[in-house]
Image: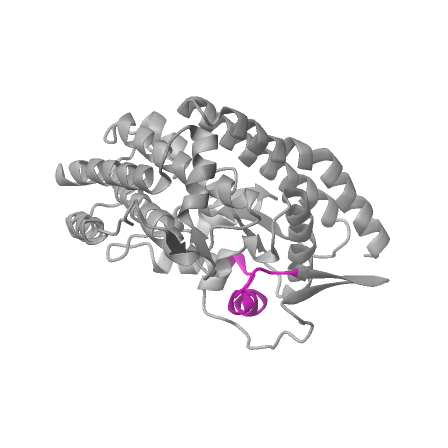
Protein backbone atom coordinates (compact mmCIF):
# COMPACT_ATOMS: atom_id res chain seq x y z
CA UNK A 1 0.00 0.00 0.00
CA UNK A 2 1.44 3.40 -0.91
CA UNK A 3 1.34 6.46 1.29
CA UNK A 4 -0.50 8.64 -1.20
CA UNK A 5 -3.42 6.20 -1.45
CA UNK A 6 -3.48 5.82 2.33
CA UNK A 7 -3.65 9.58 2.86
CA UNK A 8 -6.57 9.83 0.43
CA UNK A 9 -8.47 7.24 2.49
CA UNK A 10 -7.52 8.95 5.77
CA UNK A 11 -8.56 12.39 4.58
CA UNK A 12 -11.86 11.02 3.28
CA UNK A 13 -12.73 9.66 6.72
CA UNK A 14 -11.65 12.86 8.44
CA UNK A 15 -13.90 14.81 6.09
CA UNK A 16 -16.84 12.42 6.51
CA UNK A 17 -16.74 11.80 10.27
CA UNK A 18 -14.63 14.22 12.32
CA UNK A 19 -17.09 17.09 12.45
CA UNK A 20 -20.04 14.77 13.11
CA UNK A 21 -18.33 12.97 15.98
CA UNK A 22 -16.53 15.87 17.65
CA UNK A 23 -19.65 17.96 17.15
CA UNK A 24 -21.37 15.66 19.64
CA UNK A 25 -18.99 16.95 22.30
CA UNK A 26 -19.71 20.55 21.36
CA UNK A 27 -23.45 19.88 21.51
CA UNK A 28 -23.10 18.21 24.91
CA UNK A 29 -21.10 21.16 26.21
CA UNK A 30 -23.87 23.54 25.18
CA UNK A 31 -26.49 21.37 26.92
CA UNK A 32 -24.58 20.05 29.97
CA UNK A 33 -26.26 22.67 32.16
CA UNK A 34 -29.54 20.75 32.19
CA UNK A 35 -29.26 17.81 29.77
CA UNK A 36 -31.51 14.85 30.49
CA UNK A 37 -30.14 11.35 30.98
CA UNK A 38 -32.15 10.25 27.96
CA UNK A 39 -30.41 12.79 25.72
CA UNK A 40 -27.04 12.03 27.36
CA UNK A 41 -27.50 8.35 26.40
CA UNK A 42 -28.61 9.29 22.90
CA UNK A 43 -25.42 11.29 22.29
CA UNK A 44 -23.24 8.44 23.53
CA UNK A 45 -25.13 6.03 21.27
CA UNK A 46 -24.46 8.29 18.28
CA UNK A 47 -20.76 8.35 19.18
CA UNK A 48 -20.74 4.56 19.34
CA UNK A 49 -22.72 4.16 16.10
CA UNK A 50 -20.38 6.46 14.16
CA UNK A 51 -17.33 4.55 15.38
CA UNK A 52 -18.85 1.19 14.46
CA UNK A 53 -19.80 2.55 11.04
CA UNK A 54 -16.25 3.78 10.46
CA UNK A 55 -14.68 0.51 11.55
CA UNK A 56 -16.89 -1.52 9.24
CA UNK A 57 -16.16 0.76 6.26
CA UNK A 58 -12.43 0.69 6.94
CA UNK A 59 -12.43 -3.10 7.26
CA UNK A 60 -14.10 -3.37 3.84
CA UNK A 61 -11.48 -1.05 2.31
CA UNK A 62 -8.39 -2.64 3.83
CA UNK A 63 -9.35 -6.24 3.07
CA UNK A 64 -8.68 -5.34 -0.59
CA UNK A 65 -5.05 -4.44 0.14
CA UNK A 66 -4.04 -7.55 2.09
CA UNK A 67 -4.19 -11.24 1.31
CA UNK A 68 -5.42 -12.23 4.75
CA UNK A 69 -8.84 -12.92 6.22
CA UNK A 70 -9.61 -11.14 9.48
CA UNK A 71 -12.37 -9.83 11.71
CA UNK A 72 -12.65 -6.71 13.87
CA UNK A 73 -14.35 -6.77 17.27
CA UNK A 74 -14.94 -4.31 20.07
CA UNK A 75 -14.58 -4.94 23.78
CA UNK A 76 -14.76 -2.57 26.73
CA UNK A 77 -17.24 0.28 26.97
CA UNK A 78 -18.16 0.41 23.28
CA UNK A 79 -19.13 -3.27 23.38
CA UNK A 80 -21.18 -2.98 26.56
CA UNK A 81 -22.84 0.31 25.51
CA UNK A 82 -21.37 2.10 28.51
CA UNK A 83 -19.14 4.52 26.61
CA UNK A 84 -19.11 8.27 26.93
CA UNK A 85 -18.02 10.85 24.37
CA UNK A 86 -14.35 10.53 25.39
CA UNK A 87 -14.07 6.75 25.63
CA UNK A 88 -11.02 4.90 24.38
CA UNK A 89 -11.60 2.33 21.65
CA UNK A 90 -10.93 -1.24 22.78
CA UNK A 91 -10.58 -2.78 19.34
CA UNK A 92 -9.38 -6.25 18.36
CA UNK A 93 -8.15 -7.47 14.96
CA UNK A 94 -8.24 -11.27 14.87
CA UNK A 95 -7.61 -13.98 12.31
CA UNK A 96 -7.38 -17.73 11.77
CA UNK A 97 -4.10 -17.20 9.91
CA UNK A 98 -0.64 -17.36 11.46
CA UNK A 99 0.49 -14.32 9.45
CA UNK A 100 0.31 -11.86 12.31
CA UNK A 101 2.52 -9.25 10.67
CA UNK A 102 -0.14 -8.46 8.07
CA UNK A 103 -2.92 -8.28 10.67
CA UNK A 104 -0.81 -5.98 12.86
CA UNK A 105 -0.10 -3.80 9.80
CA UNK A 106 -3.84 -3.54 9.09
CA UNK A 107 -4.48 -2.80 12.76
CA UNK A 108 -1.92 0.00 12.88
CA UNK A 109 -3.14 1.65 9.70
CA UNK A 110 -6.86 1.54 10.52
CA UNK A 111 -6.26 2.64 14.10
CA UNK A 112 -4.26 5.64 12.94
CA UNK A 113 -7.16 6.79 10.77
CA UNK A 114 -9.54 6.40 13.72
CA UNK A 115 -7.06 8.30 15.89
CA UNK A 116 -6.88 11.16 13.41
CA UNK A 117 -10.66 11.36 12.98
CA UNK A 118 -11.22 11.46 16.74
CA UNK A 119 -8.14 13.63 17.40
CA UNK A 120 -6.89 11.23 20.05
CA UNK A 121 -3.65 12.35 21.66
CA UNK A 122 -1.93 9.03 21.27
CA UNK A 123 -2.05 5.72 19.45
CA UNK A 124 -2.51 3.95 22.81
CA UNK A 125 -6.07 5.34 23.04
CA UNK A 126 -6.90 2.49 20.66
CA UNK A 127 -5.83 -0.81 22.11
CA UNK A 128 -6.61 -4.51 21.99
CA UNK A 129 -7.54 -6.87 24.80
CA UNK A 130 -5.00 -9.39 23.41
CA UNK A 131 -2.32 -7.67 25.53
CA UNK A 132 -3.83 -9.46 28.55
CA UNK A 133 -3.08 -12.88 27.02
CA UNK A 134 0.34 -14.51 27.45
CA UNK A 135 2.85 -12.98 25.04
CA UNK A 136 3.84 -15.10 22.06
CA UNK A 137 7.07 -13.25 21.28
CA UNK A 138 9.69 -10.97 22.84
CA UNK A 139 10.76 -8.95 19.85
CA UNK A 140 12.05 -5.47 20.48
CA UNK A 141 10.46 -2.49 18.79
CA UNK A 142 13.33 -1.09 16.76
CA UNK A 143 11.47 1.76 15.02
CA UNK A 144 10.89 3.85 18.12
CA UNK A 145 12.24 7.27 18.88
CA UNK A 146 10.77 9.59 21.50
CA UNK A 147 7.77 7.27 21.93
CA UNK A 148 6.99 7.36 18.19
CA UNK A 149 5.91 4.25 16.29
CA UNK A 150 6.34 3.91 12.55
CA UNK A 151 3.71 3.03 9.95
CA UNK A 152 5.59 1.80 6.87
CA UNK A 153 4.39 2.20 3.29
CA UNK A 154 5.88 1.36 -0.10
CA UNK A 155 6.87 4.97 -0.66
CA UNK A 156 7.20 6.45 2.81
CA UNK A 157 6.33 6.26 6.49
CA UNK A 158 4.29 7.98 9.19
CA UNK A 159 5.44 8.39 12.79
CA UNK A 160 2.67 8.00 15.34
CA UNK A 161 3.00 9.19 18.93
CA UNK A 162 1.75 7.56 22.11
CA UNK A 163 0.95 9.26 25.38
CA UNK A 164 3.46 9.16 28.24
CA UNK A 165 4.36 5.82 29.83
CA UNK A 166 2.82 3.73 27.03
CA UNK A 167 5.99 1.84 26.11
CA UNK A 168 5.05 -1.35 27.98
CA UNK A 169 1.58 -1.39 26.41
CA UNK A 170 3.11 -1.03 22.94
CA UNK A 171 5.65 -3.78 23.64
CA UNK A 172 2.79 -6.10 24.65
CA UNK A 173 0.70 -5.02 21.67
CA UNK A 174 3.34 -5.99 19.13
CA UNK A 175 4.16 -9.28 20.88
CA UNK A 176 0.63 -10.57 21.40
CA UNK A 177 -1.40 -13.17 19.54
CA UNK A 178 -3.99 -12.22 16.94
CA UNK A 179 -5.61 -15.67 16.85
CA UNK A 180 -9.37 -15.84 17.33
CA UNK A 181 -8.85 -19.30 18.82
CA UNK A 182 -6.42 -17.99 21.45
CA UNK A 183 -8.92 -15.34 22.49
CA UNK A 184 -11.76 -17.88 22.73
CA UNK A 185 -9.59 -20.23 24.82
CA UNK A 186 -8.64 -17.33 27.09
CA UNK A 187 -12.28 -16.41 27.62
CA UNK A 188 -13.23 -20.02 28.33
CA UNK A 189 -10.38 -20.35 30.83
CA UNK A 190 -11.56 -17.38 32.91
CA UNK A 191 -15.32 -17.91 32.57
CA UNK A 192 -16.29 -20.85 34.78
CA UNK A 193 -17.68 -21.76 38.18
CA UNK A 194 -14.52 -20.49 39.89
CA UNK A 195 -14.08 -17.23 37.97
CA UNK A 196 -16.41 -14.43 36.97
CA UNK A 197 -15.20 -11.55 34.79
CA UNK A 198 -17.34 -9.15 32.80
CA UNK A 199 -14.75 -8.93 29.99
CA UNK A 200 -15.35 -12.56 29.03
CA UNK A 201 -18.90 -11.58 28.05
CA UNK A 202 -18.10 -8.18 26.57
CA UNK A 203 -17.17 -8.86 22.94
CA UNK A 204 -18.92 -7.43 19.88
CA UNK A 205 -18.23 -8.48 16.28
CA UNK A 206 -18.19 -5.47 13.94
CA UNK A 207 -16.49 -6.52 10.71
CA UNK A 208 -16.59 -9.94 9.01
CA UNK A 209 -19.21 -11.56 11.16
CA UNK A 210 -18.54 -15.00 9.71
CA UNK A 211 -16.00 -15.20 12.54
CA UNK A 212 -18.97 -15.03 14.89
CA UNK A 213 -19.78 -18.60 13.82
CA UNK A 214 -16.32 -19.72 14.95
CA UNK A 215 -16.80 -17.84 18.20
CA UNK A 216 -20.18 -19.41 18.92
CA UNK A 217 -18.89 -22.88 18.03
CA UNK A 218 -15.95 -22.88 20.46
CA UNK A 219 -16.90 -20.30 23.08
CA UNK A 220 -18.32 -22.08 26.14
CA UNK A 221 -20.14 -19.25 27.83
CA UNK A 222 -20.73 -20.12 31.48
CA UNK A 223 -24.06 -18.96 32.90
CA UNK A 224 -24.71 -21.31 35.79
CA UNK A 225 -25.21 -20.23 39.40
CA UNK A 226 -22.39 -22.23 40.98
CA UNK A 227 -20.57 -20.23 43.69
CA UNK A 228 -22.69 -17.17 42.95
CA UNK A 229 -22.98 -16.37 46.67
CA UNK A 230 -19.19 -16.34 46.94
CA UNK A 231 -18.95 -13.89 44.04
CA UNK A 232 -21.62 -11.70 45.66
CA UNK A 233 -19.84 -11.69 49.02
CA UNK A 234 -16.52 -10.89 47.37
CA UNK A 235 -18.02 -7.97 45.48
CA UNK A 236 -19.74 -6.64 48.61
CA UNK A 237 -16.37 -6.69 50.35
CA UNK A 238 -14.70 -4.96 47.39
CA UNK A 239 -17.29 -2.19 47.42
CA UNK A 240 -17.01 -1.72 51.18
CA UNK A 241 -13.22 -1.58 50.93
CA UNK A 242 -13.43 1.12 48.29
CA UNK A 243 -13.92 3.87 50.83
CA UNK A 244 -11.81 6.27 48.81
CA UNK A 245 -13.28 9.74 48.50
CA UNK A 246 -11.17 12.85 47.99
CA UNK A 247 -11.77 15.81 50.26
CA UNK A 248 -13.94 18.28 48.35
CA UNK A 249 -11.68 21.11 49.57
CA UNK A 250 -8.59 19.49 48.09
CA UNK A 251 -6.44 21.85 46.03
CA UNK A 252 -4.27 19.49 44.00
CA UNK A 253 -4.55 15.85 42.90
CA UNK A 254 -2.59 13.56 40.59
CA UNK A 255 -4.23 12.53 37.32
CA UNK A 256 -3.69 8.78 37.88
CA UNK A 257 -5.13 8.92 41.40
CA UNK A 258 -8.21 10.84 40.28
CA UNK A 259 -8.90 8.25 37.59
CA UNK A 260 -8.36 5.30 39.92
CA UNK A 261 -10.67 6.61 42.66
CA UNK A 262 -13.52 7.84 40.47
CA UNK A 263 -13.38 5.83 37.27
CA UNK A 264 -11.34 2.63 37.25
CA UNK A 265 -12.35 1.09 40.57
CA UNK A 266 -16.00 2.18 40.59
CA UNK A 267 -16.71 1.04 37.06
CA UNK A 268 -14.86 -2.24 37.60
CA UNK A 269 -17.10 -3.02 40.58
CA UNK A 270 -20.26 -2.00 38.73
CA UNK A 271 -19.42 -4.21 35.76
CA UNK A 272 -18.62 -7.11 38.10
CA UNK A 273 -22.16 -6.71 39.46
CA UNK A 274 -23.51 -6.95 35.92
CA UNK A 275 -21.46 -10.11 35.34
CA UNK A 276 -22.99 -11.69 38.43
CA UNK A 277 -26.51 -10.90 37.34
CA UNK A 278 -25.78 -11.97 33.78
CA UNK A 279 -25.45 -15.45 35.25
CA UNK A 280 -28.57 -15.08 37.35
CA UNK A 281 -30.92 -13.45 34.86
CA UNK A 282 -31.44 -15.55 31.73
CA UNK A 283 -33.77 -12.90 30.29
CA UNK A 284 -30.68 -10.81 29.52
CA UNK A 285 -29.46 -12.41 26.30
CA UNK A 286 -26.58 -10.04 25.55
CA UNK A 287 -24.04 -8.42 27.85
CA UNK A 288 -24.62 -4.73 27.39
CA UNK A 289 -26.22 -1.95 29.39
CA UNK A 290 -29.22 -1.56 27.10
CA UNK A 291 -30.10 -5.24 27.36
CA UNK A 292 -29.86 -5.16 31.14
CA UNK A 293 -32.01 -2.04 31.28
CA UNK A 294 -34.70 -3.37 28.93
CA UNK A 295 -34.73 -7.08 29.71
CA UNK A 296 -33.66 -7.72 33.29
CA UNK A 297 -36.31 -8.97 35.71
CA UNK A 298 -33.92 -8.57 38.63
CA UNK A 299 -32.14 -5.24 38.27
CA UNK A 300 -34.39 -2.21 38.60
CA UNK A 301 -34.04 0.75 36.29
CA UNK A 302 -32.98 3.12 39.06
CA UNK A 303 -29.63 1.33 39.21
CA UNK A 304 -28.94 2.35 35.63
CA UNK A 305 -30.18 5.89 36.23
CA UNK A 306 -27.64 6.20 39.05
CA UNK A 307 -24.95 4.70 36.85
CA UNK A 308 -25.68 7.13 34.03
CA UNK A 309 -25.69 10.06 36.44
CA UNK A 310 -22.27 8.96 37.61
CA UNK A 311 -21.03 8.44 34.06
CA UNK A 312 -22.21 11.94 33.20
CA UNK A 313 -20.03 13.41 35.95
CA UNK A 314 -17.05 11.46 34.61
CA UNK A 315 -17.80 12.87 31.16
CA UNK A 316 -17.99 16.39 32.60
CA UNK A 317 -14.53 15.88 34.10
CA UNK A 318 -13.14 14.52 30.83
CA UNK A 319 -14.63 17.40 28.86
CA UNK A 320 -13.02 19.93 31.20
CA UNK A 321 -9.65 18.18 30.94
CA UNK A 322 -9.97 17.85 27.17
CA UNK A 323 -10.30 21.63 26.94
CA UNK A 324 -6.95 21.78 28.74
CA UNK A 325 -5.47 19.30 26.23
CA UNK A 326 -5.27 16.54 28.87
CA UNK A 327 -6.64 12.99 29.02
CA UNK A 328 -7.86 11.42 32.24
CA UNK A 329 -5.19 8.71 32.43
CA UNK A 330 -3.94 6.05 34.82
CA UNK A 331 -0.45 6.46 33.30
CA UNK A 332 -0.13 10.19 33.95
CA UNK A 333 1.45 11.80 37.02
CA UNK A 334 0.28 15.29 35.99
CA UNK A 335 -0.99 17.26 38.99
CA UNK A 336 -4.39 18.93 38.58
CA UNK A 337 -5.40 22.23 40.13
CA UNK A 338 -8.87 21.40 41.43
CA UNK A 339 -9.80 25.06 41.80
CA UNK A 340 -9.20 25.55 38.08
CA UNK A 341 -11.29 22.45 37.29
CA UNK A 342 -14.09 23.74 39.51
CA UNK A 343 -14.10 27.08 37.72
CA UNK A 344 -14.70 25.26 34.44
CA UNK A 345 -17.22 22.95 36.11
CA UNK A 346 -19.22 25.97 37.27
CA UNK A 347 -19.36 27.34 33.71
CA UNK A 348 -20.27 23.94 32.28
CA UNK A 349 -22.91 22.78 34.78
CA UNK A 350 -23.59 25.71 37.13
CA UNK A 351 -22.44 23.46 39.97
CA UNK A 352 -19.71 24.43 42.42
CA UNK A 353 -17.56 21.42 43.21
CA UNK A 354 -16.90 18.42 41.02
CA UNK A 355 -15.31 16.34 43.81
CA UNK A 356 -18.36 16.85 45.99
CA UNK A 357 -20.64 15.70 43.17
CA UNK A 358 -18.46 12.71 42.33
CA UNK A 359 -18.40 11.69 45.99
CA UNK A 360 -22.18 11.93 46.29
CA UNK A 361 -22.87 10.05 43.08
CA UNK A 362 -20.31 7.36 43.86
CA UNK A 363 -21.93 6.79 47.27
CA UNK A 364 -25.41 6.69 45.74
CA UNK A 365 -24.36 4.15 43.12
CA UNK A 366 -22.52 1.98 45.62
CA UNK A 367 -25.41 2.07 48.10
CA UNK A 368 -27.76 0.87 45.39
CA UNK A 369 -25.35 -1.90 44.38
CA UNK A 370 -25.10 -3.05 48.01
CA UNK A 371 -28.90 -3.15 48.39
CA UNK A 372 -29.25 -5.25 45.26
CA UNK A 373 -26.45 -7.67 46.17
CA UNK A 374 -27.81 -8.19 49.70
CA UNK A 375 -31.12 -9.39 48.31
CA UNK A 376 -29.35 -12.50 47.08
Q: What residue appears at the point 45 percent right and 38 percent down from the top-left corner?
A: 343
- The N terminus sits in image quarter: bottom right
- Residue closer to the observer: 226 or 39: 39
Q: Residue at x 33, y 43 (%)?
A: 355
Q: Position of residue 373 (x, y in %)?
A: 18, 40
167 is within the stretch colored magenta: yes
x and y, in percent, of residue 309 in the image: 35, 32
Which of the two residues, 73 or 249, is positioned nearer the viewer here?
Answer: 249
Q: Is residue 126 above or below residue 12?
A: below
Q: Up-down: is 171 above or below 110?
A: below
Residue extending farthest left: 375
Q: Is residue 368 visible?
A: yes
**Quadrant, the C terminus:** top left
Tell whether 350 sits left or right of 149: left
Q: Which residues are magenta?
A: 161-181
Question: How many numbered discs?
Answer: 0
Q: Nearer the viewer, residue 112 or 263?
A: 263
Vertical position of residue 166 compared to residue 88: above or below: below
Question: Which residue occupies the foreground of this view, 239 or 196?
Answer: 239
Q: Residue at x 60, y 56 (%)?
A: 122
Q: Pinpoint residue 356: horizontal percent, then vertical percent.
A: 30, 39
Q: Residue at x 56, y 27 (%)?
A: 27
Q: Is residue 23 left or right of residue 266?
A: right
Q: In the picture provided, is 23 more to the left or to the right than 286?
A: right
Residue 143 within the segment the image draws in magenta: no
Picture coordinates of residue 124, whole percent (x, y): 56, 57
Residue 173 image-quadrant placement: bottom right
> Colour scheme of this structure image?
one colour
Q: Is any part of residue 202 visible from this angle? A: no
Amino acid sequence: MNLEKYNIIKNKFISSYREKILGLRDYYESKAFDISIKEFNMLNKKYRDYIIEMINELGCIFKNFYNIDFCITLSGSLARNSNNLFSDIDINYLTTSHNYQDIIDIEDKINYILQEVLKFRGKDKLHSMVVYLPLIDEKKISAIDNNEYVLNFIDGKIKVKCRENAEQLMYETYNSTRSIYDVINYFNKYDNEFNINEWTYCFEFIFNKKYLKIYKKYRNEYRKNNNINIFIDNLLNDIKRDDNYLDEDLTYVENALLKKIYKTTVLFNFYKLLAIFYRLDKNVIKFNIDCFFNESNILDKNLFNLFNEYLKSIQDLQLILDKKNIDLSSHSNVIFDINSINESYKVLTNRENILKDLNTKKKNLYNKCILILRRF
